[in-house]
Image (tube, rainbow, N blue to C red):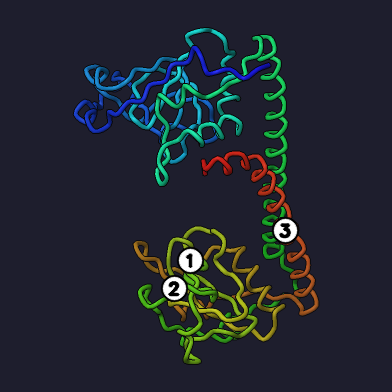
Amino acid sequence: MEPLILKGLYGYFIKTEVFIVKYFTNNPNGINWIKISDASASSKYIYQTKEKIKPEGIRNSRLVNEGDFILSNSMSFGRPYIMKTSGCIHYGWLVLKDKSGLFDQDYLYYFLGSNTTYKQFDNLAAGSTVRNLNTTPIQKVEIVIPPLEVQKRIVEILDEAFEGIDRAIALSKQNLLNAHELFDSYLNNIFTNKGDDWVEKKLGDICQNLDSKRIPITKSQRKKGNIPYYGASGIVDYVEGYIFDENLLLISDENLLLISEDGANLLARTYPIAFSISGKTWVNNHAHVLKFKSINLQKFIEYYFNSISLKPYVTGMAQPKLNQTTLNSIIVPFPSEKYCQNIVNKLDKLSTEVKRLEEIYQKKVALVNEGMIERGKK
């Protein structure tokens, strides 16, 4: 099959958004005003819009109908969508209408969304910083037009392939969810079914609080580097080492645990409430710093705190806060030292498996999205 000049498809490039504002309406029966934000990167259809315009606005835009193709014409230019409703478009879109009846709709969607077509769009796009297409060059795009029965067969093959990919991703996602649920279930079971030989101790009696070493550094004082800067919810920045000129500014001990001091993480159990650090680390005054005598004890406490809610220990709703005195008074249940080590080992293995499944899931999703990434759509 020879590639042919794109015929029977008519493109329109409309500059309208500046003039259309006065036609916006809250009337639910208004005309759909189609924006890039109405399109999902994972969908090939546009069903509805967030905004409407008055019927008078049609003459200042371009009306598109159900079944029309519209192409995004901006930073992520060339992404095709099929209209499942009617509405008006602005200059961020090109509309293509199949006047000849040469195409199966799904075949055309796959072809327009392919890397082969995108490379043509890329060569034709104007601008170096802001890439966009317009009507004249897009009509030079070459497209292979096999007989309709062949187009339908190609669509069947591609649909089957993508369905298989979706099933693989869904299975990976379910395996990941099951692994998280298994981990949480095992974690909660350990601390809700304590043995008779378990003892209770105050947190302040089994660790050293290093909060006095926290000296906040404002954002304007930080320069980018490779030393993590921790806050209440994790790493918030990476900074240069020169700011750690004084020992009081440097947290470099091992067997350290950080626990949120304030923020929403204290009221809803979201990871990480507690997390481990080692090596050179800066900690601001939104996280408590606890030092333990061994890595095994530190990990046990980390798992315990991530199995409970800190809400009973928090004061204030607008600005929830867990103060040092209250933190030190929290009662922690302990088994024998040997059983404590067994618990940590089992939880470490489960945690490693969850992370492995996360990596598998992310790799599969990345493979599916690879073409989209190459086309600059994400």
- The image shows residue 377, relative to residue 140, as above or below, that is below
Callout 3 amino acid: Tyr
User: Which mark sits nearer the N-terminus, 3 or 2?
Assistant: 3
Question: The residue tagged with tag 3: helix, strand or loop?
Answer: helix
Who's the residue at 41% across and 24% down the image? 136
Q: Mark 1 points at which residue?
A: 312
Residue 347 visible at all: yes
Question: Residue 108: percent from the left, percent from the top?
Answer: 57, 20
Question: Residue 137: percent from the left, percent from the top?
Answer: 44, 27
User: Which mark sits nearer the N-terminus, 2 or 1?
Assistant: 2
Who's the residue at 71% across and 64% down the image? 190
- The image shows residue 347, relative to residue 87, as above or below, that is below
Q: Name the residue under label 3.
A: 186
Residue 84 visible at all: no
Q: Report whether 334 appears left or right of 233.
A: right
Specify the quadrant that holds the N terminus: top right
Callout 2 amino acid: His
Question: Residue 304: percent from the left, percent from the top?
Answer: 63, 68
Q: Report whether 193 appears left or right of 242.
A: right
Characterize the local packing of mark 2: few (<14), some (14-19) or many (20 or more) Cα atoms within 10 angstroms.
many
Q: In which quarter of the image is residue 219?
A: bottom left
